[in-house]
Image (tube, grey):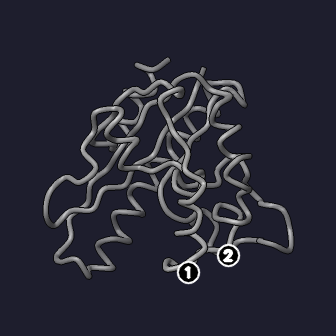
Amino acid sequence: MEQRITQELQKLGAMYTAPIAVSKISFSPELRLLCEMNRCGAYGAGWGCPPGCGMVEELARRVREYRRGVVYQSVGTLEDSFDYEGMMAAEHIFGEISDGIRLYLKSSVPEPEALVLGAGACRFCPECTYPAAPCRFPDRKNISLEACGIDVSILCEKCGLAYIHGAGTITNTGIVLFN
């Protein structure tokens, strides 16, 4: 299954992939404090971000239901460190990869045997139903690694991927979990 997922991620545009055992993933509930600072403006704004996505302990429990994972990345280029449009373009490309792998898994792997965690806020719907109504597309919603309390730099180190791919770049990282 790992090979099929890796091949599909590469077809979808993932630039780097690496396997990891879920037992090597550590969780840091204090990362949630960064979400609560709301620098991105997504805290409390959708089902994919805190607090709508659930508590770190609950999300960590979900992750631990799986044995293996494939970490995947896409890298975008930036004109400078303030290139917001470049950041959003890279996030959009990464979001398409993440949604593509979700659709692939849904068509080829019985649920809940796989879970995809991405980067950044969920942007699947133009307007989220949070908190007035349930998520319209729970199987396609994006929950970020950080919202789960996963330190992406440590995750990359543990699976042998670079966290930063050079000056003038932005890296988005996600994981596909499976048994």
Residue 74, position as x, y percentages in the image: 31, 50
Residue 64, position as x, y percentages in the image: 64, 31
Q: Amino acid at mark 1?
A: Gly
Q: Which mark, by number, is residue 45? A: 2
Residue at image location 45% in from the left, 46% down from the top: 174
> In this picture, is 12 found above or below 143?
above
Q: Spatial distance from mark 1 to mark 2, Cα to Cα? A: 8 Å
Q: Which mark, by number, is residue 41? A: 1
**Mark 1, secondary structure of its residue:** loop
Residue at image location 50% in from the left, 44% down from the top: 100
How many labels sit on residues? 2
Decide which of 139, 151 is in the foreground and name it: 151
Residue at image location 31% in from the left, 39% down from the top: 157
Residue 46, position as x, y percentages in the image: 68, 69
Left or right: where 178 falls relative to 129 = left
Q: Residues within 10 Å of mark 2 (few under 14, many from 20)?
A: some
Residue at image location 77% in from the left, 60% down from the top: 135
Decide which of 50, 91 is in the foreground and name it: 50
Q: Are marks 1 and 2 in contact (CB under 8 Å)?
A: yes
Corner quadrant of residue 44? bottom right
Decide which of 167, 112 is in the foreground and name it: 167
Q: Which mark, by number, is residue 157? A: none
> In this picture, is 147 found above or below 72?
below
**Residue found farthest to the left:** 167
Q: Residues within 10 Å of mark 1 (few under 14, many from 20)?
A: few
> In this picture, is 116 found above or below 90?
above
